[in-house]
Amino acid sequence: MYSPGSESLIKQAREIQDAELQKFYSRIVKSLQGKDFSHDTINSLQRLHLILSATKYTRVLPPELQKRLLALLLSTSVEQLQVLSSAVLRETLAPTGQDGNYNGAAQEPSSPPPNSHAAALLLSQTTSRTDVSSFCAQLLRSLEAKSSEGPPHSLTHTLPILNSLLSHCPDSLTHDHVTLLSKKLVDWLRYASTQQGGGVSVGGFFTGPRLRQPGPIAELDGTVSGDFFTVLCVGQGFTEDQWMNVHSFSMLRHWLLTCHSSSGGNANVDTAAANKLQLSLSLSLSHSLSNDDRSEVDGSVVSMVSATSSSSRLLPPKERLREKAFQYCQRIIEQSDRKAIKRTDTDLQKACLVEALCILDCVCVEDASLVYRAFPCVKALYGRLHAEPSFARVLLPIAQFYLNHGEMAAVDCECVWRLVLGRFPSELFNEPLLAHELLRFLRHNLGNLQLRLPQYTQSFPNLLKFLAWDSPAVVDDFVDLLPSLVTAGTAVELLHSLLDLPCLTAALMLQLRSTYFPISDPGGRGLLSLEAFRSPSYRGMFQFLLRGEAGSGDTIDRLSALHELLAEAADWPRVVQCAQTAPVLLHVYFNSVVTVADEKLSAQLVLVLLERSSLLLNIPKYFKEIHRVFSSHLVRLCKLRPSLVVDQSHELLEFAGTTANVYSKEDIYTHVVWVLGEYLSVSCDSRCSVELITSCFEALEAVLFEVTSSAPPPGEARPAPRVITSLMSALAKLASRSHDLIPRVSLFLSKLRTVTRGGSSVAWCSNEEDLAAIVTRGEELWSLLKVPSVAQSVLTPPPCVTAPQWHRDSNVAMPLRLRALTSLAHPH
């Protein structure tokens, strides 16, 4: 497990003597007494951590060393020393409630707020909700302290730690904590300084550097900001409250979803009261702007957001935070209209837009009255961005907003769904991040999409392009999504599409290659499939593969021609990995389709299985896996609806009567034969006549005779033993139902015995063990057929025999006998 050098170090660490360890402790204490720590200090702490973690029991550090390590953890700005101190203390400190732990020292009112590594150490020791709540109280006390009372950047650690606490223990904050933090978030979001932080250095070639007074914050396009500070404002330096503004925006959505929205049973009453108060304040706004708080006139230029926002001084803290979050997000959307000077700032605009739209959606879910104020802004943003492919990720939260609130606002959402379910998969299928987020959006809203969007199930040809292009990355998403796409109307076409997934992958690759390499470009030549893709003769086939919606047909009429055109694509890596994914999704498909399939649809599926067993892209392993899937689910369909065997007897007999299928489709052929022998019976369907049984018997008999009387065709392997035994068993079952056929089966089985007694090799079976098993099975069947009444009950037992319930039936003597035998076998 470990290298020899590592094992040697671990062994030394475990065998260190106590006297030597005490000297090592003293040496570390001396090295930690100064303010500057050398490389030897780091090496000593690394060695100490190895010693402590290598032993099975917990060692106790000397009090002085523990005190030094705690001080180092809280005071140093070197992250490597923080990590080592935290790791050492985690190995030695006792849990909460015992002496010497870190909680008691770290949670005193006078102690500074911990950094992230100190917080991780403290949380590793907490054993109850009370400990976490007291830690939260300490963090919130640090937020109330003035900036002059602690280190200049101490607050920047607090919000990330609180955000982590919300993820792991959302109930750790009390109502007072939630109220306090909501007020603080309002201050940081809305009232951060609009001046740049620190002095800006200027100077020339002949003059030394000098400092000038900090100027106002600027927008991303370089203009001076005329409104309150947001994460999209830029400057040469930032003040602490501006950094807290950024931290607040980053955790705002999580805060709203976790604590802010869970306000108990009086939430609706509080919201209604807040709305009335907000309305009255809005009416009085035109009469008295002087009574408003400073959120309205922070800058020299008042933006639309600030001018139209109502006063919220008298709102409860949660509602006030909701209002300020709404204003902040509208300001972000307003700022995103500015053209950024730097490309990195453009990416920042997109990321902040996504977050702002998600927060807007969250706020509108909490307070429905905000929907009417938000929709004009969101609708205008959609109109500005919908034609830009680079903003595709931003349009997904817009689609979420339309899905959640479009019905309330009576807005037509058709254009949004044409974009999300149409253009995105069709044109941006090769964008992995967009594929992940779009599929996550579909999974998150699956119930709403099925209920409100009939075009969702019709969009599966487009959605499958994500799967065809990058199947390993999105297969988990489609395992969840595929059942929702299976309906009675889409089942057959969806099955064909899943079987043609490797062809779709090849078509997508040819489409991109045709775009990147024009016909005149030498790089676009040399591929027959690419020439076929560009040829008008085959345009219809490729257009069908690349279609965007279902309903234009089940499959391609010239599938074999398409497979010939794409033969060279069979070894392309992307095509091969897609072929490995298709069987997994076919299992999911069949597990879903049995819940919606009626008798007519089940019959269609059986026909598709038989037809497509030979119409697949020529990838050897793909053939075998698809046949294995077909086999198991063909049996399942027939077991659920045994009448299918009579309904589709002509097609099943045609398939089973083709000798070539014995060699090329061994798996599915075996199961087709089994289905015919098992369910072609009057007990399964009253329409099953003697003539039908006889015709089936003759077809299978001819195949069995041909296979066992001659060598296999050139290039083909010998038939599998299970094919031979399946044919023999099916013939015996059919003969037991029509006694006139018993002599013919008995004659064949008797000849089979004489062939093996001759001692000569058998052309159709080279393995002696397999041949012996076949002969044994033949003798068993021959013996059974000597007594026809017994043969039928053994080969085709009634359901009461195959699924007995005797041990549960109180009307028979079996339960009494079982109890008697049990008492004899297990005496008390």
Image: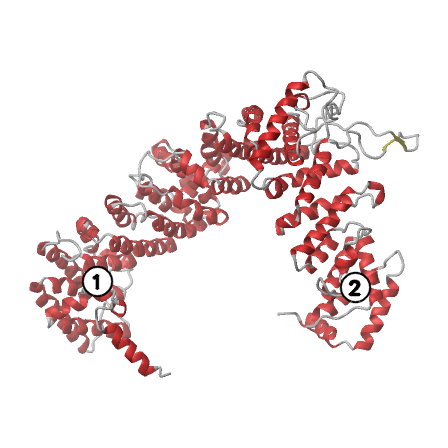
Q: Are circles 1 and 2 on residues that touch, CB within 8 Å? A: no
The percent position of residue 493, horizontal first and vertical second, equals 33, 41
Q: Which residue position is annotated with label 1? A: 799
Q: Secondary structure at mark 1?
A: helix
Q: Quadrant of the N terminus?
A: bottom right
Q: Which residue position is annotated with label 2? A: 45
What residue type is disc 2 on? Answer: Leu
Instruction: Give the residue drawn at x 82%, y 51%.
Output: 110
Outermost residue toward the top in this view: 287
The disc label shown at residue 441, or none: none
Q: Can the viewer see residue 218?
A: yes
Q: Quadrant of the C terminus?
A: bottom left
What is the quadrant of residue 802 in the picture? bottom left
What residue type is disc 1 on? Answer: Pro
Circle 2: is it few (<14), some (14-19), or many (20+) Cα within 10 Å?
A: some
Outermost residue toward the left in this view: 740
Q: Which one is earlier in the sequence, the residue at label 1 or at label 2? A: 2
